Image: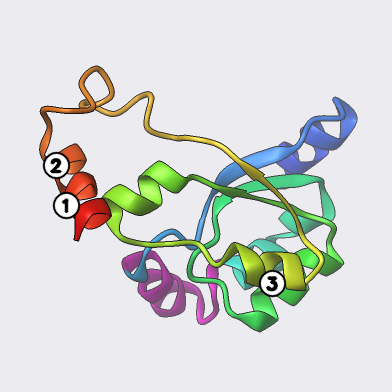
Amino acid sequence: VHDETELAERRDLPLHAHLAQSPEELKRAYERHGCSPAAWLEQLGMLAARGVWAHAIYCDDADLTRLAAADQTLVWCPYSALVFGFPAQVTRWHGHGLRWAIATDCASTPWAASTTSSAPSQAASERLTS
């Protein structure tokens, strides 16, 4: 991990990963590391570098404070949130002074070629119309 952090800093590039995207990830982090995913990144020294972290849905106020203090950027992927039913709380990010961006991570998924005929798209459509 330190090699990646040093390389990112040396090349003036941000680190990037998905962070606290699901309840399962949060549970695994506590089981394996005894802390939240954001706290684990901090323990690893990864928040010392500039970072761009997608989702951050299951970050509590302590995590958001930690990320803001480290001047990190969060990424909201609205379509993923809609499909999988895990909405980001962007207003909380903003309230903590975090930078954030809008993006998508669906281009590499099997259903990316057809947004009207797949089960995830159907589920998203049902959420929009119900």
Q: Specify few, some or many for label 1: CA neighbours under 10 Å numbering under 14, 14-19, or 20 or more.
A: few
Above or below 18: residue 47: below
Quarter of image, res 29: bottom left
Q: What element carries label 2?
A: helix
The residue labelled by disc 3 is 64
What whole-number distance in Å separates the C-alpha atoms at marks 3 and 2? 33 Å
For residue 97, the mark is none
Left or right: 70, with 94 as reference point: right
Report if residue 1 is visible in the image: no
Q: Position of residue 101 (x, y in %)?
A: 67, 44
Q: Which amino acid does label 3 sit on?
A: Leu
Q: Residue 10 or 87: which is nearer the viewer?
A: 87
Q: Which amino acid does label 1 sit on?
A: Glu
Which badge, 3 or 2, comes first in the chain's sequence?
3
Q: Position of residue 125 (x, y in %)?
A: 21, 45
Q: Which of marks 3 and 2 is in front?
A: 2
Q: Nearer the viewer, mark 3 or mark 1?
A: 1
Looking at the image, the residue that sits furthest to the front is 129
Which residue: 16% across, 52% down?
126
The residue labelled by disc 1 is 126
Q: What residue type is labelled 2?
A: Gln
Q: Residue 67 or 85: which is nearer the viewer?
A: 85
Report if residue 115 is visible in the image: yes
What whole-number distance in Å separates the C-alpha atoms at marks 3 and 1? 31 Å
The residue labelled by disc 2 is 122
Q: Position of residue 64 (x, y in %)?
A: 69, 72
Q: What stretch is highlighted in magenta?
A: 24-37
Q: Specify few, some or many for label 2: CA neighbours under 10 Å numbering under 14, 14-19, or 20 or more.
A: some
Quarter of image, res 68: bottom right
Majority secondary structure in the magenta region: helix
Left or right: 38, with 8 as reference point: left
Is label 2 in contact with label 1 (beta carbons under 8 Å)? yes
